Image (cartoon, rainbow, N blue to C red):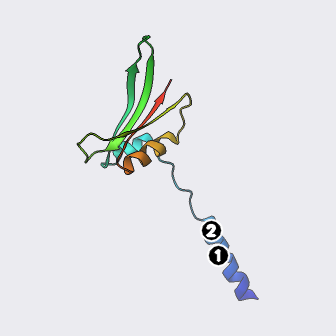
Amino acid sequence: MKKLFFYIFIDMTGCIAVKAQQPITVESVKANSLYTVQDSVLIKTKDGSYISALVVKKREIKKPLPVILQYTIYARQSDINKVKLAADKDYVGIIAYT
């Protein structure tokens, strides 16, 4: 019984000691040499207002690529994950914000 308790205790403490994975940030993706990140792109519309965009693509690819464009009014920390995923699948990932 003592051995069983010891193994359960070791197993539980091992699970508790596991750290949560750090979230991906724009800065961490910029630091990664695989991607080109433009996080302050301003697009002027016909009426003179601006749309802000986050653009990510693979650095090694120089040819024109198709684009996955997402448009939202909400800026979220997880947006970089979405455009990075698009870049990983050989697209240019763009999220535009009003």
Q: Residue at x 74, y 87 (%)?
A: 2
> Residue 65: x and y, percent?
31, 41
* Structural distance between the alpha carbons of marks 1 and 2: 6 Å
> Residue 60: x and y, percent?
25, 48
> Residue 78: x and y, percent?
52, 42
Density class for disc 2 (Cα within 10 Å; few <14, some 14-19, many ≥20) is: few
User: In the displayed structure, does residue 65 sit left or right of residue 53?
Assistant: left
Q: Name the residue tied to disc 2.
A: 15
Query: Which of the 4 image quadrants contains residue 19?
Result: bottom right
> Residue 81: x and y, percent?
47, 46
**Tag 1–tag 2 contact (CB < 8 Å):** yes
Q: Which residue sits furthest front?
A: 66
User: In the displayed structure, does residue 88 sit left or right of residue 18?
Assistant: left
Q: Nearer the viewer, residue 6 or 40?
A: 40
Question: Residue flagged by tag 2: what amino acid is it?
Answer: Cys
In the structure shown, which secondary structural element does the residue marked by tag 1 occupy?
helix
Q: Which residue sits furthest top?
A: 47
Q: Which residue sits furthest right?
A: 1
Q: Nearer the viewer, residue 11 or 48?
A: 48
Query: Which of the 4 image quadrants contains residue 45?
Result: top left
Q: Is residue 5 above or below residue 97?
A: below
Res 21 label: none
Which quadrant is home to the N terminus?
bottom right
Question: Residue flagged by tag 1: what amino acid is it?
Answer: Asp
Res 11 label: 1
Density class for disc 1 (Cα within 10 Å; few <14, some 14-19, many ≥20) is: few
User: In the displayed structure, does residue 1 sit left or right of residue 21?
Assistant: right
